[in-house]
Image (spheres, helix red, strand yellow):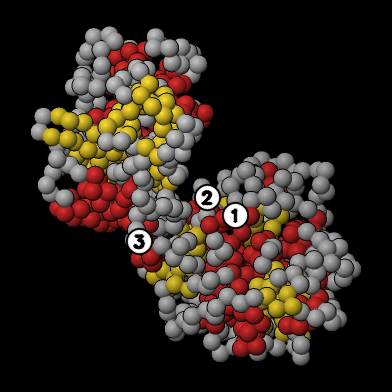
Amino acid sequence: MTRGDSSRVPAMLRRTTAFTAVWVTAVLVLTAGPAVAGAAPEPSPTPTASPSPTATTEPSPTPTPTPTPEPSPSPSPSPSPSPSPSPSPSPSPSPAPAPPAARDSSAAAAAALGEATTPVLPSSVRLTGSTRYTLAAGISKAVYPRGARTVVIVSSQRAADQQLAAYVAGSVGGPMLLVDTGSVPAATASEITRLAPDRIVVMGSRAAVSDAVVSRLSAGRTSVRVDAGTTMSLSQKALVAATPTAETVYLVDVRQLAAAPVAAATAAATGSGFLVVEGARPPSPGALATLRAVGARQIVFMNGTSGLPTSYGNALRSEGFTVARLAGADRAGIADSATAEYPSTTTRGVVTASAEATGFGSPAATALAATTGQPLYFSGERCLSDASAAVLQRRGDKVLVVGPTAQLRAEVETGKGCTAVRTTRQDKLRSSLQSALNRNSSSSYTVTVREVGGLGETVSMGGATRREPASMMKLFAAWGTYKRIERGAGSLSTRLGSGLTVGECLREMIWMSDNFCHTDLVHWIGLSQLNREIAAAGYSRTAYGQVLRGQDVLYAGNRTTSDDLTNLLKRLEEGRLLNATHTRHMLNLMHTQLFRSRLPNGLPASAYQASKPGSLWVSGGLLQADSAVVRSSSSRFVVTVIGAPGASKAGIRDIARTVYSHFNGSFGAAVTHSDLHVRTVRNTPWYRSSAGGTIAGTIPSGTPLQVSDSRRHWYKVHWRGGYAWLYYHHVRTNLRY
């Protein structure tokens, strides 16, 4: 048969017969080398193999176009679904005794790998567990509810071994379970007892899975270890043992194993082979011997050219193999392409997380896809890519999510692409914000929210409306100051006309919201120059009003929008506004600034915020506003609220809670940042009528105080029913970060 031949035997039917008929092939691989952990060399070529190239020579034929992989049209039987039981709770690992080692003989391996159990395709939409052990055990319960003849075990710490084990499990028709090097987790032990297998297949060396563990699990059963010194040689042994006849073999480079789950699942599901090779060198004699041992004709690359270069394909062609490459910019794209290798009779798409570091679902998902014969997909936290969703829709398959909701949110269960999910979520946020605005209808607010990363959700409620921003305008002055420094036209230590340095004025302008330093820095940049820079950067509805040089810019008629302020801070958070040093400097000033009674007080204590509020008496009353970068363990976003006269701090806090809850879920009490902003650090002289005036007394060390106003380094605080002026070095922040 050739690849794509409609007469190809379905994988699960082939598994039940092939392994008892081709033991001799398996023997050639599994007996190659001593039975010492990690010491087995690569297998030698079979007697019929033709000469292979050495590592120092590389054939150089004329490159041929890469053929497009063809789908296999032959249908494979689809198991009838049944409900999936819930995984057992996460147990503590159990110590294991140390009896004799499992047998490494190839005859035992062939017998062990030759027993298949028909899997059941779960009907549930998600399979999950509290640990990787309970997840694997839960999948085993769901797919093999009536037990299994063969069980594959592998170390929970060996990622490459797990993908090979998933391939073997799928090829022989049995579950994959996880163990530790020297102990067996209770979930695994319990599931093996329930399965009552005849034989245990151990993937990996004794350094990965000890003999004591194998002996405990195989009491009264046949056990066999598939062991080798490297991932490549282990892969060769696994291929010959699990799929002794494989006309098509899927190759993955050992340096780029991200595509290994796709290769393992696709190979097992289609009765093909899976092999890990070293793409940086010509095909090794062991790899060529293995391909010939299984009768391979068609080789399919699962990496791009950086992993498996064209020269590697040319070398294989010179040995008589045909070569194809599955398209895809990443493993999610390769997985999408691999669906063409499956028959049209699949009904589910097994979905796992794209980001391997975010969870533990990938090996379990690979084994699930491999044993049930369903395609494997990779998803972001909230959604599948539009391309993956389109493939699912075209095939008519429903998703089967593997992993907890903290890793893959409920939206993934819909099978929708990110564009559709983003639209739905934005509509939901817009509706929630409208409810918050209705609850605070005594004034009007413009609101803009932009998610950083994630789905990139964006909602603007009147966000293009130009309004007086009060002290939030200082964010543009800070940006302009840093940009002038980055052009080499000054530094943080440059002395201004007031006597303060640029760095000192930046701190007072953001940390203390000082209006004098705001004026100093705007005129240091040049008001007209700053307006030109603001416009050139795309903040088209933001500008300072015109005042003479040296005049106060606070009441200059400045205008901006919640859209422009949100875009500014989103670029800052993304590192696209300033260089890395100045990004950290500006965010730190915003994070530690003193006035946090608006947006920050609508967030949980665990949230990070870097904010800049504003309030100003204007015609019609006091306006309130705030803009903040907010981070949590699962989201980042920027929110800006500009209220009209009569707006309240409580209204802004309500909006903050609404937005945070949208991205992170509801929470209890919000943090309360005190209005006692600073605390004296020594017995502090205070001045009654003005900064630097006559000393009127002393404020004791450790006294918390509310700041009312400032004049550069001088702070005006509430004291004894009136006001007092203090010099800045006598106080420190009284707020927690």
Tag of residue 668: 3
Task: Assess disc 3: are there few (<14), some (14-19) or many (≥20) residues with their C-alpha within 10 Å of its C-alpha.
Answer: few
Assess disc 1: are there few (<14), some (14-19) or many (≥20) residues with their C-alpha within 10 Å of its C-alpha: many
Name the foreground residue: 566 vs 384: 566
Q: Which residue is drawn at 11% across and 47% down?
A: 442
For marks 3 and 1, the one nearer the N-term is 1
In the picture, the quarter occupied by the N terminus is: bottom right
- 267 relative position to 320: left or right: left
Asked whether, in this view, residue 70 is left or right of residue 717, the answer is: right
Label 2: element kind: loop
Quadrant location of the C terminus in the rendered image: top left
- Three-letter residue code for mark 2: Asp
> Residue 368: percent from the left, percent from the top?
54, 72
Q: Answer yes or no: do the residues labelled 2 and 1 have beta carbons within 8 Å?
A: yes
Picture layout, residue 147 above or below residue 501 = below
Residue sitting at the far front? 697
- Mark 1 residue type: Ala
Residue at image position (54%, 65%) is: 361
**Location of residue 416 with respect to 446 vertically, above or below:** below
Q: What residue type is labelled 3?
A: Gly
Nearest-to-viewer mark from 3 and 1 = 3
Q: Residue at x 40, y 40 (%)?
A: 704
| Residue 589 visible, this angle | no
* Residue 7 percent across, percent down from the top left: 54, 74
Q: Mark 2 points at which residue?
A: 330
Residue at position x 72%, y 45% in the image: 280
Discs 3, 2 touching: Cβ within 8 Å? no
- Residue 258 badge: 1
